[in-house]
Image (cartoon, rainbow, N blue to C red):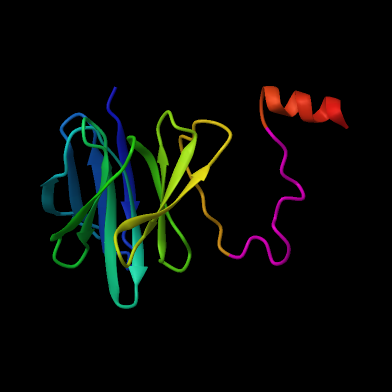
Amino acid sequence: MLRRSHAVSPDGKQIWATRRESGTTTVFAAKPPFAVREVINTGPATGAVNFAQRADDSFAYVSVGGDQPAIKVYRTDSLEAVTTIPLQAAPTAVWPSGDGTRIYASLAGTNKVAGIDTLTYTTASTIPISTDVQSLIYVPGAVRSGKGLANLVPSGRDAALALAAR
């Protein structure tokens, strides 16, 4: 089974596609004839890809597993490698905040999500979660007031315990 992740750059000009088995990421033109712009050797167990836009600059964030789990950062204009952000466990999903200041990466087997500062390229926070996350979705402005916890309930065994306690 081939495992791949695809994402379109914020300007709509590129498609980035990862390939876990070969440890590569292919960057295509997003308009016909969809020419390959470059194949980047990103590393073992290359996984998810997503983007963060800061001012006029756009960056691709590619998850890499293996012995040295990390997020690798690339400029989308030149495809130049910017940095590698080490993580405590393999990232399984990568998602940007709406304002481009954070990239969130789920950490396999840890029940945690790393919050990466896109200006300093460091892990700014580690957020505990209740289960091992496989994907992330960040919705800017979804909660207009309060903490946004009113309709959240635990899942699985925790849900049954929460319902029994009511």
- Between 127 and 61, the one lying in front of the other is 127
Give the quarter of the image for residue 86: top left
Q: At 69% from the left edge and 67% from the top edge, which residue is drawn?
A: 144
Give the quarter of the image for residue 22: top left
Q: Tell me if residue 38 is in the magenta stretch.
A: no
* Image position, residue 85 (x, y; %): 26, 50
**In the rendered view, would you say 110 is above or below 116?**
above
Most distant residue in the bottom direction:
56
Q: At 13% from the left edge and 61% from the top edge, which residue is drawn?
A: 80
Give the quarter of the image for residue 63: top left
Q: Quadrant of the N terminus?
A: top left
- The number of discs equals 0
58 to the left or right of 43 = right
**In the rendered view, would you say 61 is above or below 132?**
below
8 to the left or right of 136 = left
Prevailing SS of the magenta stretch: loop
- Between 56 and 129, the one lying in front of the other is 129
* Image position, residue 30 (x, y; %): 26, 58
Most distant residue in the right direction:
166
- Between 67 and 13, the one lying in front of the other is 67
Q: At 70% from the left edge and 58% from the top edge, which residue is drawn?
A: 147
Q: Tell me if residue 142 is in the magenta stretch.
A: yes
Q: At 70% from the left edge and 55% from the top edge, which residue is drawn?
A: 148
Q: Quadrant of the C terminus?
A: top right
Which contiguous range is marked in magenta? 141-154
**In the rendered view, would you say 78 is above or below 134?**
below
* Image position, residue 61 (x, y; %): 29, 53
* Image position, residue 26 (x, y; %): 18, 47
